[in-house]
Image (spheres, rainbow, N blue to C red):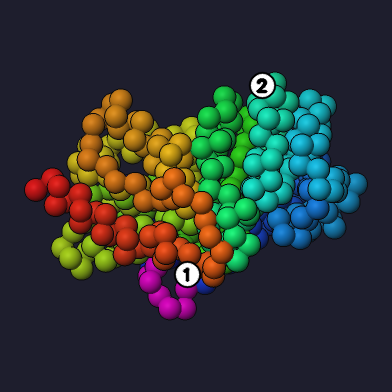
Amino acid sequence: MAEMHLINDVRAKDIIKEPNRAGFGRGLVAAGDANKNVVAACADLTDSTKMDAFAKKYPERFVEMGIAEQNLATFGAGLAAGGKVPFIASYAAFSPGRNWEQIRTTICLNDRPVKIIGAHAGVSVGPDGATHQMLEDLALMRALPNMVVIAPCDSVEAEKATLAMAGDSRPNYMRLAREATPIITTAQTPFEIGKAYIFREGTDVTLVATGTMTYQALVAADILAKDGISAEVVHVPTIKPLDEKTILASAKKTGLVVTAEEAQINGGLGGAVAELLGEQLPTLLKRIGMRDHFGESGEPNELIEHFGLTGPHIAMAAHQLIGLKK
């Protein structure tokens, strides 16, 4: 296994936290520094999506579209047709939630390399409630031909992903969280679009996670280790295209798989892994995520616990699979 350069103790009380959208903001400025064709547009949420730094440094390359997400998508497609590398951002509930048809028709059908940023995704959005807690975006975007779908685990990876997206010739979607979450990777941790990574080796069960849920999978692996269970943690920052080789190799080794995501399991990472295993390697599987349910209003940590999106719940699912196998 290649060296992952992760932090040493994911359960440390003093672990550094930062919203992964902050990493996107830094990455967008760096992408703009490297390529004068990188441009940006936002739907009246410049500060929240962390496009503000780019807008201040490159005002001539930034457009504030106002509350007009459908225009945002078609404007981005036009910029891409003219040779630009456009990043368009809003809350995920509105983009792709409100403008999916424009993304489908003007961006994907024409295979335009527009980079779509969906911020404030997942139930961890908190008090804003179900209307703003976008849980269906992974399924919506994974179903679109030509679309790349990315969910970084922390702000460090989000910055790397942004730079990688700027150099990718396909339409891209990246989902970002609102709340500060643990930083578990470093500047040396590898990232490449389309690659999954073994963050922890194991032999008894495979934990496949994406986005900020990868931190929870590492916590679960620590819990399981105390129970004498060796868990392998596979981080999947790119849901599409899926790194089938890495996931299949781990599933073949352990014979048990648990997926974890802060999104609907129908059509999201859990759906993608279930499809893969069903077609190529039938394996006992449990999926952690939103199970055909909308979010609710509450504090972020309260909601994560309420919907069973924590390390202990992932560990419990692993125990259940091991029981079934026995």
Q: Quadrant of residue 231?
A: bottom left
Q: Quadrant of residue 245?
A: top left
Count the numbered circles shown: 2
> Is residue 269 found inside the magenta-colored segment of the image?
no
Residue in view at x 60 percent, y 44 percent? 174
Residue matched to label 1: 302
> In the shown orientation, is residue 55 left or right of residue 211?
right
Mark 1 lies on a secondary structure that is helix
Label 2 or label 1, whichever lies nearer to me, is 1
Residue in view at x 84 percent, y 48 percent? 66
**Label 2: few (<14), some or many (≥20) within 10 Å?**
some
**Which label is found at residue 148?**
none
Q: Is residue 23 visible?
A: no
Give x and y (percent) for residue 246.
34, 38
Kind of residue at badge 2: Leu
> Is residue 13 found inside the magenta-colored segment of the image?
yes
In the image as oriented, which residue stretches furthest toward the bottom?
Answer: 14
Kind of residue at badge 1: Glu
Give x and y (percent) for residue 112.
70, 27
Mark 2 lies on a secondary structure that is loop
**Which label is found at residue 109?**
2
Residue in view at x 62 percent, y 53 percent? 131
Give x and y (percent) for residue 108.
65, 26
Please identify the dominant SS of the magenta region.
loop
In the image as oriented, which residue stretches furthest toward the left?
Answer: 326
> In the shown orientation, is residue 156 left or right of residue 82?
left
Looking at the rendering, the stretch of residues picked out in magenta corresponds to 9-15
Q: Is residue 298 visible?
A: yes
| Closer-to-camera residue (191/308) | 308
Dot 2 or dot 1, earlier in sequence: 2
